[in-house]
Amino acid sequence: MRRFRRTIFFSIAAAVIGLCLIELCSFIFFTVFQERFTFHEVDRFMLRDGDAERLRREYDRRFGWDHHYDTHLTERPRPVEYGHPLIATFGDSYTHCTDVQDHETWQTYLAGLLGSDVYNFGTGGFGTDQAYLKYLEIEPGLETPIVVLGLISENINRIVNVYRPFYFPKTGIRLPKPRFTLGPGGLHLLENPMRSVDGIPRLGEEGFIRKLGEHDYWYNRDRHPVRRFPYTRILFNRRMWLEAFHGKIDKQINDVDPRPWENLWDDPRVSELMFAILGSFIDSARGSGRIPVIMILPMQDEVFEKLYTGDNPESVSMIEAFCARRQCPCFNAINTLAASVTVPEEIPTLFIVHLSPKGNRIVAREFKDFIMQQAYPALERRGGA
């Protein structure tokens, strides 16, 4: 009996020591490597030292943020003006052509091929909702008969987001944004919750941060782990393992695609919202006598997938099918880039993070042919080509 008790005692002691060691190792690991994971700490979402002045420059009451270029319509500067307004483009950083100079955007190359002005109203970090709102704001001053709404398939994640750090805590874009909801009668706009630039200091208030989460799909949706005792509990958190896994493969977690494991195109409520936004853009453009075009811009892994399998992501097929139903021209730049290479090793030359100058030239060349086939006949019938 005594031997049995001793065995039980040492077994329990060994288990306790083992658990303590695991807890200690977990504490050390998640303290040293805390920046590699996302924890639910409200202060991660709050105003950071030194950010206020930059945010004041970027803030926009209508859209959340914008580039605020000092040009006629606040478009990205154009190296050459042809005096013939033809196309206006709206969208996120892939439309803006972040990573390249003004003379290296696909809009600049396209303008040279067409001998006409192509306006770039893209804004980094925008969701399709913000791009549509910007179109509505700019439209009255536009003289272009063709308007393009560009998007990447990831953009669906942004239309249910109100405060970008909830979607990607490490983002440099740390301002709230408007979003749409879908209800009786169609789209309903929830305006930017920060009604003036003077509200930026409120991002330092925990209560305001939590209030921003009320209409944000991503607000602690994953039940992020909390970095506190017991640290061993973090090991059982799904989000932690997803971040660890995706941090070791090519599809990295970054500001362009913060959640590579998410696919809201499978959520009927969210996909319906996206198509309502696209449909409203099409209707608005046609209502003002313009020709709308939807442009699907490429992410690098999508071009690899197309080259290897011959297939586009299901989300791209859904967008193309929607455009076909609405009889709206839809340009698929994923197919364009995949068709331009013969071996996979060529694909990285088409990208920096966004498209490289080489990638932009290819898109411009093929989009020019697309416009000539899809839009010019309608313009000629109107006498506007």
Image: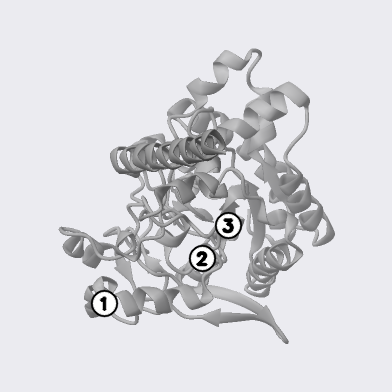
Between the C-alphas of marks 1 and 3, the distance is 25 Å
Q: First in sequence: mark 1 or mark 3?
A: 3
Residue ID at (51%, 22%) = 348
Q: First in sequence: mark 2 or mark 1?
A: 2
Q: Mark 2 = which residue?
A: 161
Q: Position of residue 353 (x, y in %)?
A: 44, 34
Residue ID at (38%, 42%) = 20
Q: Nearer the viewer, residue 138 or 41?
A: 41
Q: Quadrant of the N terminus?
A: top right
Left or right: 98 with respect to 90? left
Question: From the viewer's perspective, is residue 303 above or below residue 381?
Answer: above
The amino acid type, in three-letter code, at marker 1 is Arg
Left or right: 64 with respect to 301? left
Q: Mark 3 = which residue?
A: 157
Residue ID at (64%, 26%) = 304
The amino acid type, in three-letter code, at marker 2 is Asn
Asked if the residues shown at circle 3 and circle 2 are in contact, with their CB atoms under 8 angstroms apart, the answer is yes
The amino acid type, in three-letter code, at marker 3 is Asn
| Label annotation for residue 300 | none
Q: Mark 1 = which residue?
A: 202
